[in-house]
Image (tube, rainbow, N blue to C red):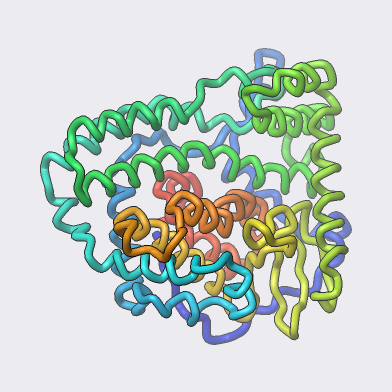
Amino acid sequence: MIRLKPILAAVVLPALLPVLAMANSLSAEPFFKHFTVMRDSKGNADLIMINTKPQEVQMSAYLEELQGMVSFAMSENLLDENALVQNFDAQDLQAWPKNYQRAAGRSLKELQTVDLEGIAKDKKFSSVMKSVGSIFKKHLMGSKVVANLNDKRFFYSRAGLSQVLSIAQQYIEQRIPPSQALELAKLLAGRVAHSIQTRRAFHQYMLLHYLENFEPKDLGLTAQEVARAKSSIYESKIPGYAFWQSNKAKRTWDKFGTAHFDRTVAAGGARLARNKKFYEFDQRVNYAFSIVSEKGKKKIVNLMNPRFMYSKKPSDAYFFDNPYRVQRQRLLIQLAQMGLRFVPVADLPMLIAKSALNSFLSSMYVPHQITEGALLAYFETVKDAVGAKALGEAISDPTLMQDLAMP
């Protein structure tokens, strides 16, 4: 549940040496909280799974989360066309494509006209949403597997979630006439599909932090099992059409993941080097994130995801003097996307396509939130409770909240 609150005092993390040099100060305990290693009859690691209780797809929980986001935004006067100017740096907004800022502001304002409470109380709407949850149930259960160390095509052979989403949306359109309720129902179905799709990836980025920064024995694994876990993670990212990559993974299983991981580390270092002029110093905390100082502000930047499409600068992930700043910005972006569904095309600035604006807004936070599985793992292993709390409380995904034992 999103709970954005002011932090009165700056939070400064102790200066860090390279993470591996501080292995004695790191705690692997969170690894065993989040993951379960399943073993075969010989005691060898076979699967790494999310350590969570069985879940159902509760569409009502996703609706309640949206209602909470909108309610908070209204209490903070964020559903206003000027909210973006008040919460984003002018330099960042100037880099947006022409008229996108105005269109996003118009979308925020439109949310004030949506009767979320009235739609939620409608019995037909609730019945349809309950059935939609059943459509997604199978895929939620399957998303618990984070790595399969021995099946070299485990993820490549999985059924596509996009087909399930299409079925769910067709089901909705056949039962709810064109209205705000229809748009809300399709929005909820999309959020559930996204949740299931990204659940595994979030935990995979979290797992990679542990595989990078702890000795295999500290995780109850062997060096070969660590290498195969990495291979399985990167095998899961192979597109369905790229059969040649799947074949390569199969041929080079014990090295495939390590090679990809090393390239990820190098790419992050290169992105940081290209933007060196902006930062006074940097300290790499793991393969995906680095502590930097820019204009006297100490923060953590994401080395894997730029600020938005067209940008080459690392995105901001966390500010030590204002832990909730990034989360507040993302709340605004998500609300703008929600409102965009309800805005009449005629009310948008000329030549603005909803799909293009939606993709641009997604590029500002969707991949970043997934990668931040590694940042949450970092905060937990160095026992930074403030950072972990700020990151965790900004999660607006009921399934992921339960996985992470969020209240």
**Residue 43 appears in the figure:** no
Q: Residue at x 85, y 70 (%)?
A: 276
Q: Residue furthest front?
A: 350
Residue 281: x and y in percent read: 84, 75
State whether residue 106 is above or below residue 141.
below
Q: Residue at x 88, y 58 (%)?
A: 21
Front residue of this view, candidates 387 and 372: 372
User: In screen coordinates, is 187 left or right of 172?
Assistant: right
Residue 217: x and y in percent read: 79, 37
Number of marks in picture: 0
**Residue 342 appears in the figure:** yes
**Quadrant location of the N terminus in the rendered image:** bottom left
User: In screen coordinates, is 259 left or right of 399?
Assistant: right
Residue 264: x and y in percent read: 80, 45
Residue 402: x and y in percent read: 43, 47
Q: Quadrant of residue 270?
A: bottom right
Q: Residue at x 40, y 27 (%)?
A: 164
Front residue of this view, candidates 127 and 182: 182
Q: Residue furthest top?
A: 41
Q: Residue at x 23, y 35 (%)?
A: 130
User: In screen coordinates, is 222 left or right of 310?
Assistant: right
**Quadrant location of the C terminus in the rendered image:** bottom left
Front residue of this view, candidates 319 and 217: 319
Q: Quadrant of residue 152?
A: top right
